Image: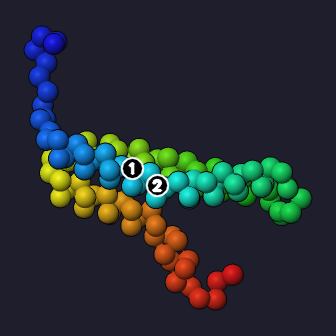
Amino acid sequence: MYAGLKPTVERSANLNITLFFTVLILHFTCMPIARDGIAMVKYALLHPDEFNHPLSAFLLGVFTFTSMIAAELVCMSNNQSKKSVSDAMVSAIGFSLIINLPAIYMNSIEDFP
């Protein structure tokens, strides 16, 4: 290999499999929210007359989509530092809760249209 460069972390197969599935589950958690952001952008572009401020609706959709992409990137980079299966699972559950927090809050308000 390269002279003087050694891998710093040896990972087990169990940890690699766990990291793969936790990132996959997080991706499936982020997909519907990102899809809603893309749909909002599309709707704001095709029906600007239905909004008082179509640029705000467009930017909200862009922000929703990019925040989900950023959340996935942060999760993947955070997973690189995990050294045990339990740490990886706890991290994935925490990220999943953080991503779903707005939906949990909005669903808790009963008279919210």
Please state which amino acid type lies under the numbered disc 1. Answer: Leu
| Residue 10 x/y as whole percent | 12, 35
The answer to whether 77 is drawn above or below residue 38 in the figure is above
Please indicate whether residue 41 sits to the left or right of residue 65 in the image.
right
Quadrant where the N terminus is found in the figure? top left
At mark 1, the secondary structure is helix
Which residue is painted at 39% across and 62% down in the image? 96
The answer to whether 38 is drawn above or below residue 7 in the figure is below
Question: Mark 1 packing: few (<14 Cα in 10 Å), some, or many (20+)?
Answer: some
Which residue is painted at 70% across and 56% down in the image? 40
**Which residue is the site of mark 2?**
28
Which residue is painted at 52% across and 71% down in the image? 103
Please state which amino acid type lies under the numbered disc 2. Answer: Phe
Please indicate whether residue 32 sits to the left or right of residue 17 in the image.
right
| Residue 106 x/y as whole percent | 56, 77
Q: CA distance from mark 1 to mark 2?
A: 6 Å
Q: Does the image show residue 84? A: yes
Question: Mark 2 packing: few (<14 Cα in 10 Å), some, or many (20+)?
Answer: few
Which residue is painted at 35% across and 44% down in the image? 76
Asked if labels 2 and 1 touch by Cβ distance under 8 angstroms, the answer is: yes
Residue 24's disc is: 1
| Residue 89 x/y as whole percent | 25, 58
